[in-house]
Amino acid sequence: MRTSPCQNWVPQGRGEPRLARRAKRPEAAHVRLSSILAIPAVLLLGACGLPRGKDAPPSGLISGVIPAFWQEASKEQHNRISTGWLPEFQDPQLSALVREAIAKNNDLRAAAYRLKATRENNITARARRLPLLTTNTTANRRLNGSGSSGDNPASSYGMSFATSWEIDVWGRLRDSEDADLADYRAAIADYRGARLSLAVNTAKAWINLTEAQQQVDLAKQTLQDFKKSLSLISRRHREALLRAVDVQFGRNNVASAERNLRSQVLRRDEAARTLELLLGRYPAGELKATPNLPTLRRQIPAGLPSELLNRRPDLAAGRERIYASARRADTARKSLLPSLRLTGSAGNGSSDLRRALDPSFLTWSIASSVAQTIYQGGAPSAAARAALELNKAAIYGYVQNTLQALREVESALQVDLSLREQEGFLLIEVDQASKAQEAAERDLGLGIEGSSVLEILESQRRAVNARGSLIRLRNQRLQNRLNLHLALGGDYDSSVEN
């Protein structure tokens, strides 16, 4: 347990017996020692008046916002969350692409090097608590010319050592080091979050590419259907059974299908480039998709809301940043206190190199000093108060991020249920639209009375829209499932958990 450096300190006032026994001095000529000591005493009491930073949010602040169960989850989803969501999609190529992205994505590589730099910076923080030792060696050769032939150059040699060490009386340097270590732990959590986000984004890009390819295939099939209908309409027109305007409607549909096909091809190639960029490849748009989207076979367990605090990397990083801000608040507060420094030096100099290197001729000194800032316009106290406010800001920022994380899970759970229900209705819509299209084409081909070109064109339009909507909805379900995995935290593969 950390203790305040002010708990056992009591300022000494006037009237000490030792001081009273001293010879009286004229007050106008000398300032009393007690008056001199009063200045740092006031500063010390000012440091004691500032509270310590809070290492974590108050328990009531967090427990008051976390429910016992997810409101949008079914009873089956309250089971413990399984680690490693990638195998759920049962797509070996997707798994291979995610691992390739983790290994070759340039943004993640840059994040890894930044993490290593943060780790190295901790050495700097640790070094502040250790003595500083420097050495200096000199060798001079000098000639003072007088114009006479007897002038000879003179040589001199010297070697010196110096050391300086700030004694961490109040624990200020230790607090600073602890803050830097907490920053490093937060950086580790941030890296885990970046890795998880990359895995999710790679899976999303792959699913988008597959959906885009399916839309291209649908556009090709639609174009064939429209050409087939145009052929039928043209034949019936030549038989004087249909009007010229009906042929124009058919040609309009074919032109629209041609345009849509080229639009879908462009969209597919752009989806391929997006995925290739995540993989660290050249964005040539040449990556090929599989013909089918992954199938979601079950609901995933969402666990309990309280488990989210330990699973989400961003919340873990937030807790570390609260701790770091608390330690920096303590560091700023202890900067108001006096600092104690030990210094030492040793050296030797001579015109004789042997004597310069002889330890018996060494001269040395050791000294100690106490430093205290007397006046700086209130800047040190303001910095200490500002650090406390930043600590409070970190706490409430963490609480808000927790609420945001809870919202993401609740929304993803609700969307998952809604999209599953919508898919059931959309399957009926596709089935009925396909049957209506077949009936309209059959009636027109047989010349059944009452059949019309507008009827067949409308049935075709509805069937195409329904099939395209089903492809998009299945993509939405997969994208939302990935959002849910991301919101729940954890990792894409159980072998890399934590």
Image: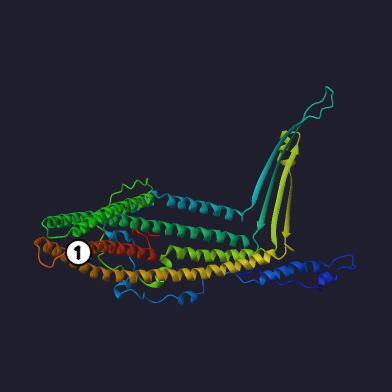
Give the percent coordinates (x, y) of residue 218. Answer: 23, 57
Name, please, the residue furthest toward the top: 149
Above or below residue 364? Residue 467 is: below
Residue at the image point whose x is 28% and y is 57% from the top: 211
Give the percent coordinates (x, y) of residue 348. Answer: 74, 41
* Front residue of this view, candidates 478 and 184: 478
Residue at the image point whose x is 18% and y is 66% from the top: 431
Give the percent coordinates (x, y) of residue 91. Answer: 27, 56
Residue labelled with disc 1: 454
Q: Which quadrant of the rendered structure holds the C terminus?
A: bottom left
The reply, left or right, for residue 420 in relation to residue 498 is left
* Front residue of this view, candidates 132 and 474: 474
**Quarter where residue 146 is shown:** top right
**Which element carries disc 1, helix, strand or loop?**
helix
* Front residue of this view, candidates 325 and 269: 269
The answer to whether any part of residue 56 appears in the image is: no
| Amino acid type indicated by mark 1 | Leu
Number of numbered discs: 1
Give the percent coordinates (x, y) of residue 480. Answer: 33, 65
